[in-house]
Image (cartoon, rainbow, N blue to C red):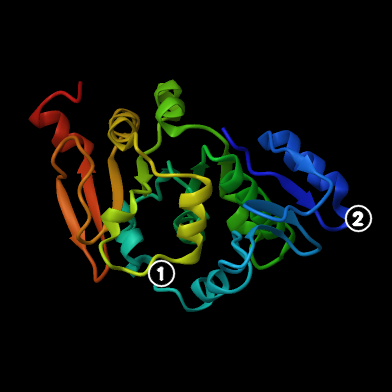
């Protein structure tokens, strides 16, 4: 199986590159690749690059869209906040983002005060997240938010069943990557193109949903394209539809009263 290489473009960051390569089992190369995809650590950040197809893909919690969300975001009125059950004086849940990707939903939830555990099995995505988190920890505007975000490089379908009872989260959030056919004619964003080339689809989504249902104490939230197929498994307790996205909600108490999960 091909492993995405890591190239360090800045001599001053060689130690950081070695740490990333060791932590995520990435091959560290001395020359910038001339084909395929690779991770490149520059002066500012870690990026996923390729020749000619699109620009750099990276995780970002300080600037750009993340900054806009912090300053202009809709608070608890945001769809993802409603989906995980943020309302009134109800205690903020611990959320496990089982398919963290570039961490955007995790960042929104952490910015609203939730403790978020980000699970990511891809070494490429996990490395991008680790780099973004490090930068967020250093910036005064995002230090408090980053402190509520914990990255775990692991397969969620295997990690969730191993949780002790006392550490089970209230909410498990799942945003699986499905094949292109599931996206109909919608334009695929550049990072999705890159991720599908480098990371691949989540073909074990049914197993992940089952693990999530057994781990969450309150609900499992599955994010899907509005017209996308549901994950094979129990029927959602409720569905929240948006313009291009929907959330399938699985309320654990309701499912348990209906029939056993096993």
Residue pushed farthest front? 34
Q: Give the number of the disc on residue 231.
A: none
* Nearest to viewer (mark 1 / mark 2): 2
Left or right of residue 193, residue 25 in this image: right
The residue drawn where x is 72% and y is 64% is 139
* x and y, in percent, of residue 43 in the image: 81, 63
Residue 171: quadrant of the picture: top left
Residue 258: quadrant of the picture: top left
Q: Give the residue pinned by disc 2.
A: 12
* x and y, in percent, of residue 187 in the image: 36, 69
The residue drawn where x is 52% and y is 56% is 194
The one of 222 and 257 positioned closer to us in this rendering: 222
Image position of 164 with respect to 77: above or below: above
The one of 149 and 196 positioned closer to us in this rendering: 196
Residue density around tag 1, few if under 14, some if 14–19, many if 20 or more, within 10 Å: some
The residue drawn where x is 21% and y is 42% is 250
Q: Is residue 9 visible?
A: yes
The residue drawn where x is 59% and y is 59% is 59
Q: Give the residue pinned by disc 1.
A: 75
Q: Secondary structure at mark 1?
A: helix
Q: Secondary structure at mark 2?
A: helix
* x and y, in percent, of residue 256 in the image: 16, 29
Residue pushed farthest right? 12
Residue pushed farthest left? 258
Structural distance between the alpha carbons of marks 1 and 2: 39 Å
Residue density around tag 2, few if under 14, some if 14–19, many if 20 or more, within 10 Å: few
The one of 198 and 137 positioned closer to us in this rendering: 198
Which comes before the other along the chain, label 1 or label 2? 2
Q: Which quadrant is home to the C terminus?
A: top left
Left or right of residue 64, residue 105 in this image: left
Image position of 85 with respect to 26: above or below: below
Q: Which quadrant is home to the N terminus?
A: top right
């Amino acid at each position: 199986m091909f492993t995405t290489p890591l190239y360090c473009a800045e001599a001053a960051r060689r130690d950081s590159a070695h740490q990333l390569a060791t932590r995520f089992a990435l091959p560290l190369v001395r020359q910038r690749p001339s084909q395929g995809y690779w991770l490149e650590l520059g002066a500012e950040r870690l990026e996923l690059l390729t020749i000619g197809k699109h620009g750099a893909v990276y995780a970002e919690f300080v600037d750009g869209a993340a900054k806009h969300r912090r300053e202009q975001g809709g608070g608890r009125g945001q769809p993802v906040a409603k989906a995980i059950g943020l309302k009134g004086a109800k205690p903020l849940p611990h959320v496990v983002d089982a398919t963290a990707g570039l961490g955007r939903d995790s960042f929104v939830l952490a910015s609203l005060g939730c403790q978020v555990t980000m699970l990511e099995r891809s070494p490429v995505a996990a490395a991008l997240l680790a780099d973004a988190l490090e930068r967020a920890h250093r910036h005064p505007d995002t230090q408090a938010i980053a402190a509520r975000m914990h990255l775990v490089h692991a397969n969620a379908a295997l990690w969730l069943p191993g949780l002790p009872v006392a550490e089970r989260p209230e909410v498990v959030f799942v945003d699986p990557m499905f094949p292109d056919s599931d996206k109909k004619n919608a334009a695929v964003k550049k990072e999705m193109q890159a991720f599908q080339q480098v990371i691949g689809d989540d073909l074990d989504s049914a197993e992940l949903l089952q693990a999530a249902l057994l781990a969450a104490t309150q609900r499992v939230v599955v994010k899907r394209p509005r017209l996308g197929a549901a994950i094979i498994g129990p029927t959602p307790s409720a569905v929240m539809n948006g313009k291009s996205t929907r959330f399938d909600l699985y309320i654990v108490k309701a499912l348990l009263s209906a029939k056993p999960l096993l």
